[in-house]
């Protein structure tokens, strides 16, 4: 069993390489890690291309859901994306927050941050920024975000409870999150649990579904809602790299479920509505001489 720091270093190294990989290769493997399947074109990721704000430059095919589709983002919101990669969810969120909103992407891997910033610069997006940092200790202040999103990232983090506490900290009262992640029902074979590629591939780092939902509740969130659930099947040609034929048969008949969840939850408190900024001419008209407002 690797230590937490060893797991983090593994993720950093793997995702530095994944940042340079082709989307098709990432989609045909487990979150871009390990061998690609010749049986299945797309193992985990959903199709973002129909969402408004989608930019192909930011899509590396690494997700396991569409959290921004369910995140109820409003114009003027501040959105934080955990594990922002090349910027995919940030660019979709940017469309929703409009010119008066802001999107902050946080990623652990320097190569991902570099690629995301290059994408934002080339697209001329000036209300999206990317910060390198550990989501167990986010580089943002308290009560900054109206919405937090994340796509297939928490299963890569050793201390998931710390991340939930950080999400609670950075959300404003009444703010909420929508997170897609991989969870389990039943136990993975020992060989998959111990395989580094399966950890970086968002599989062996997953926890039980019941434990995941309870972790959210214990962090203080309320109105916890399961927005979407889909089963994930690891193709046989990938399993053959790690398990014998007998082990594969046992695993496939054993009833262990690997699934993607998209979960919504709210931080208690009264939400403060975002007020649109006044245009200069509106401000000048409101601040007439003698009004005492200027």
Image (cartoon, rainbow, N blue to C red):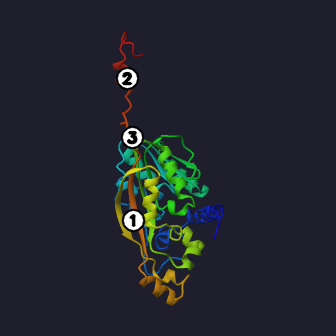
Closer to the camera in the image, 254 or 176: 254
Question: In the rendering, which numbered label is found on residue 283?
Answer: 2
Provide the secondary structure element on which disc 2 rests.
helix
Q: Can you say whether 190 is above or below 60 in the image?
A: below
Give the residue number, with chain letter if any, for mark 1: 46
Residue occupying image coordinates x 39% and y 52%: 265
Q: Can you say whether 50 is above or below 245 in the image?
A: above
Residue 114 placement (x, y as % from top left)? 58, 53
Residue 30 placement (x, y as % from top left)? 50, 71
Residue occupying image coordinates x 40% and y 57%: 67
Residue occupying image coordinates x 35% and y 44%: 74
Q: Earlier in the sequence, mark 2 or mark 1?
A: 1
Of discs 2 and 1, which sits in the foreground? 1
Residue 228 placement (x, y as % from top left)? 35, 62
Q: Can you say whether 129 is above or below 190 in the image?
A: above
Q: CA distance from mark 2 to mark 3?
A: 31 Å
Q: Is residue 88 visible?
A: no
Q: Is residue 121 left or right of residue 45?
A: right
Dot 1 crowding, Cα within 10 Å, few <14, some 14–19, many 20+? some
Question: In the rendering, which numbered label is found on residue 269?
Answer: 3
Closer to the camera in the image, 227 or 270: 270
Q: CA distance from mark 2 to mark 1?
A: 44 Å
């Amino acid at each position: 069993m690797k230590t937490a720091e060893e797991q983090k270093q593994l993720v950093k190294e793997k995702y530095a390489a994944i940042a340079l990989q082709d989307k098709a290769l990432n989609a045909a493997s487990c979150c871009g890690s390990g061998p690609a399947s010749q049986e299945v074109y797309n193992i985990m990721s959903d199709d973002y291309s129909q969402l408004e704000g989608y930019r192909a430059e930011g899509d590396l095919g690494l997700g396991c859901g569409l959290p921004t589709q369910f995140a109820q983002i409003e114009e003027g919101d501040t959105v934080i994306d955990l594990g922002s990669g090349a910027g995919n969810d940030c660019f979709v969120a940017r469309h929703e927050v409009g010119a008066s909103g802001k999107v902050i992407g946080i990623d652990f891997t320097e190569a991902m941050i570099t690629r995301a910033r290059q994408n934002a610069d080339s697209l001329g997006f000036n209300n999206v920024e990317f910060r390198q940092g550990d989501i167990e200790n986010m580089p943002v202040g308290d009560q900054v975000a109206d919405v937090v999103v994340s796509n297939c990232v928490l299963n890569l983090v050793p201390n998931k409870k710390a991340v939930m506490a950080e999400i609670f900290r950075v959300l404003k009262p009444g703010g909420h999150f929508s997170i897609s992640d991989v969870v389990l029902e039943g136990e993975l074979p020992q060989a998959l649990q111990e395989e580094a590629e399966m950890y970086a591939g968002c599989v062996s780092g997953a926890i039980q579904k019941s434990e995941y939902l309870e972790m959210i509740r214990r962090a203080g969130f309320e109105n916890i809602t399961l927005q979407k659930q889909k089963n994930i099947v690891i193709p046989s040609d990938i399993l053959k790299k790690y398990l014998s034929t007998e082990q594969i048969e046992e695993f496939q008949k054993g009833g262990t479920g690997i699934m993607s969840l998209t979960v919504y939850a709210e931080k208690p408190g009264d939400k403060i509505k975002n007020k649109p900024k006044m245009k200069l001419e509106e401000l000048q008209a409101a601040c007439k001489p003698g009004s005492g407002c200027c």
